[in-house]
Image: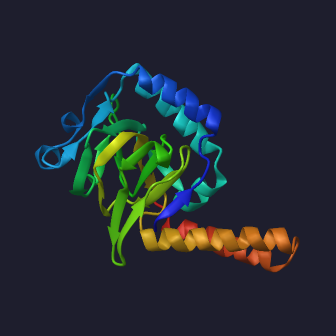
Amino acid sequence: MLLHVPAILDATQVARFREALDGGEWIDGKATVGAQGAQVKRNQQLADGSPLARELGAAVLAALAASPLYHSAVLPLRTLPPRFNRYRGGGQYGMHVDSAVFSVPGTPHRVRSDLSATLFLSEPDEYDGGELVVADTYGEHGVRLPAGDMVLYPGSSLHRVTPVTRGTRLASFFWIQSLVRDDGQRSLMWELDGAIQQLAGEVPGHPALDRLTGVYHNLLRQWAQT
């Protein structure tokens, strides 16, 4: 499932992030991947665990906590601390698939990358290129979203970032381990939750709501992995 989640950050928050990132200490993105990824990766990142990355990452997590759409679609169990990258001057990231499991820096914990997330921090008219291209059985899908908006896609997807030929593309990116590991099952839960919410809004008190809510939670009880 490829999902656009709008307005995770508002304009004021985006401006604060941008100001902070302008003064950030950026390193070569190749330092954060293995030998295979380093062959196709050409960008910059904030150092994992740096004070600025921790501060802005905590702000991203707080914003996600306030998004009902995010929680409904993802059913998050664990989230890797958000990271931040910068593409400019032809920077790109060739076709690749993300690691299946990530260690959480400074802890003994790990996160399985059921979903990948990219939170855009630059407006589309500020740069050329820089599309996130996600491949699935229906072909390749290019994504360029307004600043503050986020895209979610399966962590198992092949994807790439096209060369940035003008301007600068800033983004936060991270991975989530869901309560429901299977993407198809998770998509069904999201559709069912959306139908319940629509029915509750249009026909409040309808007797089917209790039954449908029961089905939702019984499916979650069956599929959830904690």
| Residue at (32% x, 68% y) in the render | 135
Q: Is residue 226 visible?
A: no
Q: Relative to the observer, which residue lies in front, 145 or 213?
A: 145
| Residue at (84% x, 78% y) in the render | 207
Residue 109: x, y in percent?
A: 35, 39
The colour scheme applied to this rendered structure is rainbow
From the viewer's perspective, is residue 225 above or below residue 27?
below
| Residue at (59% x, 37% y) in the render | 62
Q: Quadrant of residue 72?
A: bottom right
Residue 201: x, y in percent?
A: 82, 68
Q: Relative to the observer, which residue lies in front, 203 or 53?
A: 53
Q: Relative to the observer, which residue lies in front, 179 or 49?
A: 49
Q: Is residue 66 visible?
A: yes
Residue 85: x, y in percent?
A: 35, 37
| Residue at (28% x, 34% y) in the render | 44
Q: Is residue 151 left or right of residue 32?
A: right
From the viewer's perspective, is residue 183 above or below residue 122?
below
Q: Quadrant of residue 190?
A: bottom right
Q: Relative to the observer, which residue lies in front, 83 or 184?
A: 83
> Exactly how many numbered labels are in the figure?
0
Q: Quadrant of residue 188?
A: bottom right
Q: Is residue 40 left or right of residue 16?
A: left
